[in-house]
Image (spheres, rainbow, N blue to C red):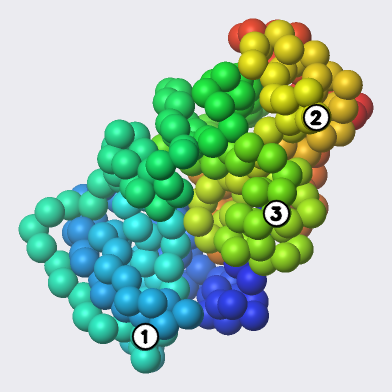
Amino acid sequence: MVPPNPRRNFRFWLLVLLLAGSPELGGALRNGLCRGDDAKGTRLEQVRFRDGKGVSRQVSGRVLTEAADGGILVEGQDGRLWTVEPAQLDGRTAGDQSFSPLTPEALSQQLLQELGADFEIVFARHYVVATNAGKPYGQWCASLFERLQGAFQNYWRQRGMEPREPEFPLVAIVLKNEREFARFATRDAGPDAAGAKGYFSIETNRMVLYDLTASGNGPATTPAEISRRLAAAPFNIATVIHEATHQIAFNSGIHTRLADNPLWVTEGMAMFFETPDLTSRAGWRTVGAVN
């Protein structure tokens, strides 16, 4: 999991400290980030600002909280969080339209515009997978994540908890090899993420990974070959499942983005689910198993 980089965005960490120290603000922000379907009546705003690199942006989204100095936390229709300091804010316009997340189709178009023409999209019930690793691997990842999603929801419901369905389509970006991943991760999340097998970003709400089957013999092109190659390196796929669990937990109300979630809870839960189950097509029999 990749938290917001404090050197790139000081206000993210200021908000985290405020959450820990102010029950009133913490409760308001937690409600804003976890309210799910109840938030669909929130007014949609067009927020114009300059990001940390000075690039002018316009984000369609909802303002989750506003600081006394005029700084705001904005959640885009794609689920991304933007912290905007007063000096960065160029304007806000609210209309009559209510906030709603982007549809998977609209989100896929946004991803293709951002990532480039060599990417293609794989749709699943909860996921939009953008990949340049080839459709077979993208489909395999989408199937794996959907099985994990179902196992996660069922596990906690059977124990009396009520995880909610994700409000936003869950985005996974799958790069075709480790080199491209390192280049993308350095730009997206910082150099510390470049050496990982994958990561989930609290800020963007996206998971980023690469084709773990890519080798000198070329990528695997069938589900059976993908599973065979990955079974030879279970630690690698466990890392991907670990990050996928973070994404699910932060989008089902179990954890809250930017809140003071105890590290032992967030990391412990991801480790609890990370043991791979590559043999089942429907269930997930390895929850809590030793990895």
Lower sequence index among marks 3 and 2: 3
Residue 274 in the image: x percent, y percent? 77, 32
Residue 15 in the image: x percent, y percent? 54, 75
Q: Residues within 10 Å of mark 1 (few under 14, many from 20)?
A: some
Q: Which picture quadrant has residue 150?
A: top right
Identify the disc placed on residue 182.
3
Residues at marks 3 and 1, CA–CA distance in whole angstroms = 30 Å
Which residue is at 63% across, 37% downward?
176
Which is more foreground, mark 2 or mark 1?
2
Q: SS class of the residue under badge 1?
A: helix
Which residue is at 34% across, 34% downward?
104
Residue 249 in the image: x percent, y percent? 60, 41
Amino acid found under the numbered disc labelled 2: Gly
Q: Residues within 10 Å of mark 2 (few under 14, many from 20)?
A: few
Which residue in the structure is indicated by mark 1? 88
Lower sequence index among marks 3 and 1: 1
Identify the disc placed on residue 216.
2
Residues at marks 3 and 2, CA–CA distance in whole angstroms = 18 Å
Amino acid found under the numbered disc labelled 3: Ala
Q: SS class of the residue under badge 2?
A: loop
Lower sequence index among marks 2 and 1: 1
Q: How crowded is mark 3: few (under 14 residues within 10 Å), some or many (20 or more)?
A: many
Residues at marks 2 and 1, CA–CA distance in whole angstroms = 47 Å
Residue 152 in the image: x percent, y percent? 63, 28
Which residue is at 61% across, 55% downward?
184
Q: Nearer the viewer, residue 206 or 260?
A: 206
Q: Which of 239 and 138 is in front in this view?
A: 138
